[in-house]
Amino acid sequence: MVNYPVGDFLIKVKNAAAAGRKNVTVDYSELVYAVSKLLNREKYLSKVEKTEGKLSVKVAFMKKDPVLVDLKLVSKPGKRVYKKAVSLRSHKGLSFFIVSTPAGIMTSKEAAKKNLGGEVIAEIH
């Protein structure tokens, strides 16, 4: 049993990228699927497939190096972190947050454009 499925998924993807593995398979959930689609859209994953109760993803590589360099979980089961749209707008740099908003899972840049805040799941570098 997994206590925090989306955190487990993100850490598995990070570890697979660091180890040079291309495929990751986890148990399916709507939240994990939404996060994987976002990472696919942002080109950190090259393929996302859902099968019977499982979700298979392929980590994206560019010239034998993984595209995903670093990932940090922000919200954890014991401590959820929420940010308003104003503080998401003030986040500068190359990294971005994965945010769970009332309108769905999106990047911090998309949430700031739509003036939405929400739970910050992870930060992607």
Image (tube, rainbow, N blue to C red):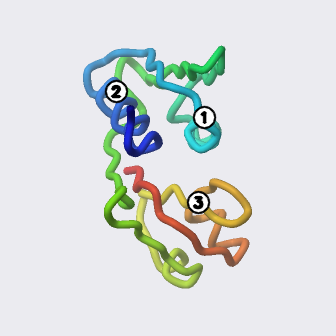
Q: Earlier in the sequence, mark 3 or mark 2?
A: 2
The nearer-to-camera label among 3 and 1 is: 3
Kindly identify which numbered label has been placed on residue 95.
Answer: none
User: Which amino acid, by three-letter code, is at mark 1?
Assistant: Asn
In percent of width and height, residue 35 lies at: 57, 43
Q: How many marks?
A: 3
Q: Check if mark 1's residue and mark 2's residue have beta carbons within 8 Å.
A: no
Q: Residues within 10 Å of mark 3 (few under 14, many from 20)?
A: many
User: Which amino acid, by three-letter code, is at mark 3?
Assistant: Ser
For label 1, the residue is 40
Q: Which of marks 3 and 1 is nearer the N terminus?
A: 1
For label 3, the residue is 100
Who is closer to the viewer here, 115 or 32? Answer: 32
Q: What is the distance, in whole Å, between disc 3 and disc 1 at their CAs? A: 16 Å
Q: Which residue is depicted at the point 33% across and 39% down?
A: 69
Does dot 1 land on a helix, a strand or a loop?
helix
In percent of width and height, residue 91 lies at: 45, 73
In percent of width and height, residue 30 lies at: 64, 40
Does dot 3 land on a helix, a strand or a loop?
strand
Q: Is residue 22 above or below residue 114?
A: above
For label 2, the residue is 17
Q: In this view, does 70 lie above or below 26?
A: below
